[in-house]
Image (cartoon, rainbow, N blue to C red):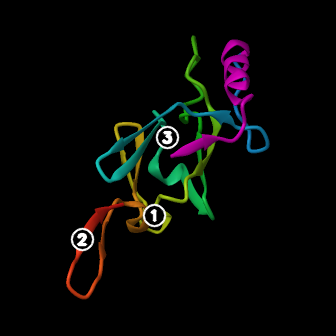
């Protein structure tokens, strides 16, 4: 139902994790995701812990789904001295080519406990349907 658009993004993600660099708007970090089909709905879940829903941007142009998010540092008082900072900050992005069989006009988005979940219904034209052959005296049904 989807295709990865950049085969080297996983390599970039690993290098960013090892080097400790954060994503920027010009070179965002990759966000982890799961994708699966649940009945007549395709579900994509993105991990975005610590990101407020207002900092998430979801866009669909033709069949290209783009999700961008930004995790900013928490404001700290001048008296606070950071001892350890391992949680990645910056910009995260993912682009996914969606199949023509998905109804991109009816995408639903939910955000709960740091997980963005998109539900994309399978288009009616892509669902299996029964076709009737019409005749004067005899009608047969064929599954298609």
Instruction: Tell which circle, 1 or 2, labels the residue nearer the N-terminal end.
Output: 1
Mark 1, mark 3: which one is toward the viewer?
A: 1
- Tell me: 130 left or right of 126: left
**Residue that badge 3 annotates:** 51
From the viewer's perspective, is the residue at label 2 or at label 3 nearer? 2
As measured in the structure, the alpha-carbon distance from the residue carrying label 1 to the one carrying label 3 is 27 Å
Q: Residue at x 71, y 38 (%)?
A: 28
In the picture, the disc for residue 140 is 2
The residue carrying mark 1 is 103
- Distance (Cα) linking label 2 and label 3: 56 Å
Q: Nearer the viewer, mark 1 or mark 2?
A: 2
Depth check, front residue: 137 or 111:
137
Query: Mark 1 and mark 2: span between their CA atoms?
Result: 31 Å
Which residue is depicted at the point 61% across and 42% down? 3
Magenta range is: 1-19
**Does dot 3 land on a helix, a strand or a loop?**
loop
Label 2 element class: strand
Q: Position of residue 100 (x, y in %)?
A: 55, 59
* Residue 18 pos. (x, y %): 69, 12
Magenta segment: does it hold 10? yes
Q: What residue sits 55% from the left and 36% below the top?
A: 75
Residue 143, located in which quarter of the rendered image? bottom left
Sequence-wise first label, 2 or 3? 3
């Amino acid at each position: 139902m989807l295709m990865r658009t950049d085969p080297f993004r996983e390599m970039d993600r690993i290098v960013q994790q090892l080097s400790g660099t954060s994503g920027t708007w010009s070179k965002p970090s990759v966000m982890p995701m799961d994708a699966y089909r649940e009945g007549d709905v395709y579900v994509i879940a993105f991990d975005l812990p610590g990101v407020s829903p207002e900092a998430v941007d979801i866009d669909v142009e033709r069949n290209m789904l783009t999700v961008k998010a930004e995790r900013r540092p928490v404001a700290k008082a001048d008296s606070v001295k950071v001892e350890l900072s391992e949680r990645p900050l910056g910009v995260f992005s993912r682009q996914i080519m969606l199949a023509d069989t998905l109804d991109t006009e009816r995408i639903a988005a939910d955000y709960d406990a740091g997980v963005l979940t998109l539900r994309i219904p399978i288009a009616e034209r892509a669902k299996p349907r029964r076709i009737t052959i019409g005749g004067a005296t005899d009608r047969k049904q064929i599954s298609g």
